[in-house]
Amino acid sequence: MTIRDRLPALLALAIPVVCGAAWMAASGAPFHYPLVNLGALALVSVWMLAGRGPHTALSRHILLITLLVILLCPLVIGPELTSITGDRVVRWTPLGPLTLHTGMLAAPALAVLAARNRSYGAAFLLAGLLAVLLQPDAATGFALTFAAVGIHHVTKDWKFGAVAILGFLASIAMALAGEIPPQPFVERVLVDATLQSIILGIVLAATLLASFALLLFAIPLAREARFALAGLFFGFAVMAFMSNYPTPFIGYGAAPILGFGLALGLHRIPAR
């Protein structure tokens, strides 16, 4: 596979990330916000252009366990924020000077692994849903649910359909657990940008649509993996628009850039 074949994957991230960074820089965001996003993009670009997925059973198991550990990290070491209902919400974990949203960091690669494993892929997604149910994180819950919908659409495997139903119910329960106040340039990005300028809001929304189209139709992954990633992204983006959840790529946050970048470099995973 040539670098040219992988360019759509790079564009799926670069288009919204660069446009989002430009908006943040022009709109008075803290100086480091666009720099963090662009730095994360630069970091994963090399992997997206040269990476390879785990091609042995052992390496796939190691990656799966690592992703599940990342999802569970906030329950052990992550900083806590109080939701508007008074419940404790734990969705982040520190990494040096950054605080990363673990769902956005781990879910994309988890979705790709699930898409390439007909035998246990549904169980992978269920494990991820359980981890985010404990946080709770409705955005990641709905994202994993739509990833299951995407895989089921391609494979017609009833197990992924069952996961989608369970994920939808669990995500509704997570959504009812409460929200945290929105952070500028992180949550409600499209709403805030549209209040500045309708044209600006349309442009940023168009970059997300372009990213979705590239994930669904153009990235050089197997069809079920493309639909899984596109479904995952759709879930994150819709929840960010509907409620106070981080907006992927165009809002401040390294986690979705690193997470999707990792997943987009996982090429040639053997189907199981």
Image (cartoon, rainbow, N blue to C red):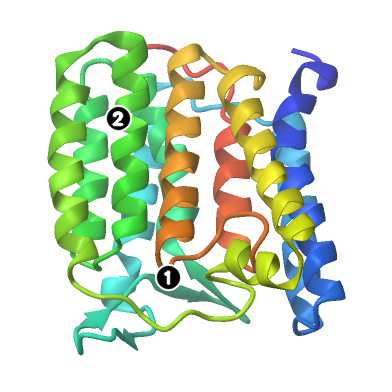
Nearest to the observer: residue 201 or residue 228: 201
In the picture, measured across the screen, residue 188 lies left or right of residue 199, that is left
Q: Relative to 157, is 176 above or below?
A: below
Name the residue type under label 1.
Answer: Asn
For the C terminus, which image quadrant?
top left
Res. 58 in view: no
Q: Nearer the viewer, residue 129 or 59?
A: 129
Q: Residues within 10 Å of mark 2 (few under 14, many from 20)?
A: many
Instruction: Report which residue position mark 2 lands on.
Output: 148
Q: Is residue 207 left or right of residue 63?
A: right
Residue 194 locus on image (x, y percent): 67, 64
Image coordinates of residue 112 in percent, x first then y, are 44, 30
- Point out residue 166 in the picture as x, y percentages from the top left corner: 12, 40
Query: What residue is shown with label 1?
Result: 244
Q: Is residue 65 above or below residue 21?
A: above
Residue 56 vertical position relative to residue 131 in the rendered view, above or below: above
Residue, x 49% and y 19% (percent of image)? 269
Relative height, residue 57 to residue 138 (above, below): above
| Helix, strand or loop under label 2 | helix
Where, quadrant-wise, is the N terminus in this rendering?
Answer: top right
Q: Position of residue 4 (x, y in %)?
A: 84, 19
Dot 1 surroundings within 10 Å: few (below 14), some, or many (20 or more)? some
Which residue is found at the position 34% from the left and 21% from the top? 151
Task: Give 264 or 196, whichever is nearer the viewer.
Answer: 196
Total count of labels = 2
The residue under the point 71% across, 47% down is 44
Tell me which amino acid carries mark 2: Ala
